[in-house]
Image (cartoon, grey):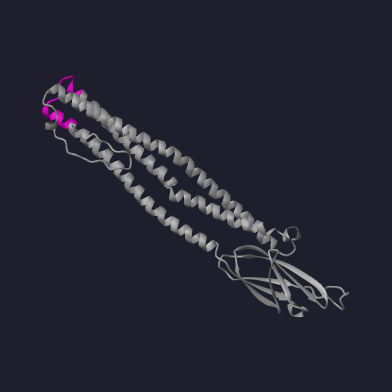
Amino acid sequence: MIHTSMPAPGILPHRARTQLADLHSDDEDIVTSLGMTSRYLQEKILAIAGWYMRRNQRRTVLSKAMRLGAITFAALGGVVALLCVLALTPGRPEIQHLPVEVGQLGYVAFALAAGCIVIDRVFCLSTGWTRLMGSALALQRALAEFQLDWARMHRELGGQPPTQAQAEQMLLRLEELHSATFLVVELETQIWMADLQSSLTAIHQFAKMRAHALEAGPLDVIVSSGALADDGLALYLDGILYSYFHGTRTQLSGVRAGHHVVMVLATIRGIPVESTATTQLSPGAIGTVSVALPVPHGSSRGEVS
């Protein structure tokens, strides 16, 4: 008999050459053996094709969900970035004091969008459903061609037992169907292995991208009129006291990327003054923000210009 141990999809079957001598010599036994082998192969092909189609349905839904999530989060991140740029534009007091958390949400949205794409790549959702669909269609095509050839062979028999040559031809056609099934499964497995290797590369690239996105950098703070401060200046970053310094310039180290609010408090000529500025710091870049302290006129009771 033809080797009938068909594997699960993704596992290569063992092929064994079957000769007509392996079948019983009796004409009725030969017909029965060929019929049983034909039915078995067709059932196995339908089972494998059905397995591919069921897997394909799940991957299609997940692939669409991941791509929709990537588009949504990327659009949200773009809107947040636009708001941060507008907040830094002079003459827009309505959004000048944009909360710092809003700017950070932009980076979170972009990270989620990238995460959706990576999930799609790692689990081969988009490439997987096309691969599974192609394999299922190839199996269905091979089965349809076999059924037509098998029906033609039976019609040529005319209800009589097959001759030696006819039996050899029918057996050869069964072996061709078995080989075609093997090749489809083998090709699908090879593509899956290539996708897996590509997925591992995508994971490595995503890890590097996330590390770069979280990379902190220095922030140069330039304070005009800072030299006029009586006892130095107090610098607040995002509402938290960061440092005290003297002069017109200082540098903050280890500032994470994103939207930040810088506030400087000082006393000039005995009058407390303060000023606030916002900035957008890119990952790993050196940022610069200028803070203009108002200069009071006259004594401690004077006006501030």
Instruction: Tell me: residue 135, above or below residue 224.
Output: above
- Near-viewer residue (146 or 248): 248
Q: Quadrant of residue 25?
A: top left
Q: Is residue 166 magenta?
A: yes
Which quadrant of the figure contains the N terminus?
A: top left
Closer-to-camera residue (137/117): 117
Q: Position of residue 192 (x, y in %)?
A: 36, 47
Residue under the point 19% across and 24% down: 32
Question: Splitting the image into 4 quarters, where does residue 157 fall?
Answer: top left
Give the magenta part as a residue range: 155-170
Residue at image point 86% right, 73% down = 303
**Rendering coords of residue 160 (x, y %):** 15, 20
Q: Main secondary structure of the magenta part?
A: helix
* Lateral position of residue 168 relative to residue 122, left or right: left
Quadrant housing the C terminus: bottom right
Residue 118 lies within the magenta run = no
| Vertical placement of residue 96 versus 186, above or below | below
Q: Is residue 181 left or right of residue 224?
A: left
- Left or right of residue 10: residue 295: right
Residue that protrudes farthest toward the top in the picture: 159
Q: How many marks?
A: 0
Residue 135 vs residue 259, the one in the foreground: 259
The answer to which image quadrant residue 205 occupies is bottom left
Relative height, residue 63 to residue 108 (above, below)? above
Q: Residue at x 44, y 55 (%)?
A: 202
The percent coordinates of residue 30 (x first, y second) are: 15, 25
Residue 78: percent from the left, percent from the top?
60, 55
